Image (cartoon, grey):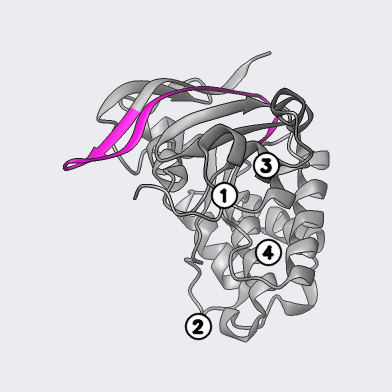
Amino acid sequence: MTAAIDARGLGKDFGPIRALDRLDLEVHEAEFFGFLGPNGAGKTTTVHLLATLFRPSRGAARVAGHDVARDGLAVRESIGLVFQETTLDRDLTVEENLRFAARLWNRPGRVAAPRIAALLRQFGLEERRRDPVRALSGGLRRAVDIARGVLHEPRVLFLDEPTAGLDPRARRSLWDLIRGLRAASGLTVFLTTHYVEEAEPCDRVAVLDRGRLVALGTPAELKRQAGVTSLEEVFLARTGHPLAETGAE
């Protein structure tokens, strides 16, 4: 399989704190890949390194075939990124936010308009297109975030704790949207989460703790190898402490 993400010995220090320690990781094209670990385990640091928002302290990585240290612009053009906290302009409407994003990606109106219309339909936002973002529920704001993240048709979509703060119904609706998006486009999705139920549907899962990769495989493989029935128990077996416990910053 072709690698959408390939990291070798990737690491990041913040002063004396080692946030990520020699990560070796390969994510295949069109894979739904889960990055599971407690808050502070290094998941967001990894995403920021792969998205060129941080420079590595050591090691190397390629995303969509481009080196994150040398070809930052090419990497950023190849990825979509949805942060833990929304970065939408809450005073603009849904459609205005998408149009603004299209301009940032240098998409002319004749190209952007049908793409935006298609995303509004796909994400169930047509009737809310003229509503300011501040008037939307948390779940709908997240839908707009993701629509904006895939507006330029990236090869890899990073979702960093995308359902944090959402109620169970909104979380289910959001995952329905993501599954539909993947089915329609063959997009590679890299998900960070501390919810085991979100990691279960992933093709493969990497388990991260205190900046170190402690397990990697399909959910079924990980549970079978550990002799347990849940990914939460896999984490406990690999680390000696429960998933809810906070890792290193």
Q: Secondary structure at mark 2?
A: loop
Q: Secondary structure at mark 1?
A: loop
Residue type at mark 3 is Glu
- Nearest to the eye among marks 1 and 2: give it: 1
Q: Which residue is mark 2?
A: 91
- Nearest to the eye among marks 3 and 2: give it: 3
Disc 4 versus disc 2: distance between alpha carbons?
17 Å
Q: Which residue is mark 4?
A: 143
Q: Nearer the viewer, residue 154 or 21?
A: 21
Q: Secondary structure at mark 4?
A: helix
- Looking at marks 4 and 1 on the same chain, the residue that comes earlier in the sequence is marked by 4
- Nearest to the eye among marks 4 and 1: give it: 1
* Numbered-mark total: 4
Image quarter for residue 7? top left
Kindly check if marks 1 and 2 are in contact, taking CB atoms under 8 A apart as contact: no
Residue type at mark 1 is Leu
Q: Is residue 217 left or right of residue 36?
A: right
Disc 3 versus disc 1: distance between alpha carbons?
8 Å
In this rendering, is residue 48 above or below 139? above
Magenta stretch bounds:
11-33
Which dot marks residue 179?
A: none
Estimate the x, y position of residue 91 in percent, counting from the top left. 50, 83
Estimate the x, y position of residue 214 in percent, counting from the top left. 52, 29
Within 10 Å of the Cα at label 1, are there few (<14), some (14-19), or many (20+) other Cα atoms?
A: many
Q: Which residue is mark 3?
A: 233
Within 10 Å of the Cα at label 4, are there few (<14), some (14-19), or many (20+) other Cα atoms?
A: many
Within 10 Å of the Cα at label 2, are there few (<14), some (14-19), or many (20+) other Cα atoms?
A: few
Estimate the x, y position of residue 198 in percent, counting from the top left. 71, 50
Residue type at mark 4 is Ala
